[in-house]
Amino acid sequence: MTQPPTPPNGDQPHQPPYPEQPQQHQPPEFGGYQAPRDQGPNAAGFFKALFDFSFKSFVTVKFAAVIYGVALVLIGVLALVGIIAAFITMTESAAGGLLTLLLVLVAAPFYLILIRLTLELYVSMIRTAQNTAATTTELENLRREMSQRR
């Protein structure tokens, strides 16, 4: 979407938006709500979060990408070794080599998908916990504001 040009003095033009652009409505603000901040390891410091025995800081979201990258490389190397082993096995037994090759070509993507699904499950659980905590905090703030108005 293109925005209308701004005048040189920096003032916003006092004209309606272009006809092809729909009006964008801002959601109402309730009690000065702010989106939850990143509650990952950077929020409390990495080592502080790592050794937090109350588990109020989460390192799972930060490490999911690292774990997935390591798993991707490890599975790739093991698949390459398996393919080489399958070709070596084919020199002695064609059926055994083909079976090994088929097993490697099926197992490698299967394990990669399994690791990805597991990591997504963990990350979604952590984000659900973070959002639930932020919602609880916001509800408490709203209740406090409502009780002060009475």
Image (tube, rainbow, N blue to C red):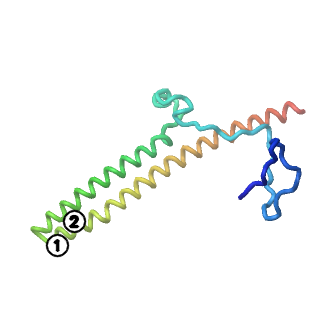
Q: Residue at x 11, y 68 (%)?
A: 91
Q: Work out which residue is located at the far front of the displayed protein and give it.
A: 8
Query: In terms of sequence position, does the residue under pointer 1 or pointer 2 come before the other?
Result: 1
**Residue 41 percent coordinates (x, y):** 51, 34
User: What is the three-letter code of the residue carrying label 1?
Assistant: Ala
Do the CB atoms of the residues marked 1 and 2 lie less than 8 Å apart?
A: no
Q: Which element type, helix, strand or loop, lies under badge 1?
A: helix
> Which residue: 36% across, 61% down?
109
Taking depth in this image into account, of 102 and 76 the one nearest to the observer is: 76
Residue 63: name its quadrant: top left
Instruction: Tell me: residue 46, above or below residue 1.
Output: above
The amino acid at mark 2 is Thr
- Give the labeled residue for mark 1: 95
Quarter of image, res 116: bottom left
Quadrant in the picture for the N terminus: bottom right
Residue position for label 2: 100
Determine the residue located farthest toward the left in the rendered image.
92
| Classed neighbour count for the residue bearing mark 1: other residues with Cα under 10 Å, few (<14), some (14–19), many (≥20) | few
Q: Where does the image place residue 68, in percent across and percent down from the top left?
A: 41, 49
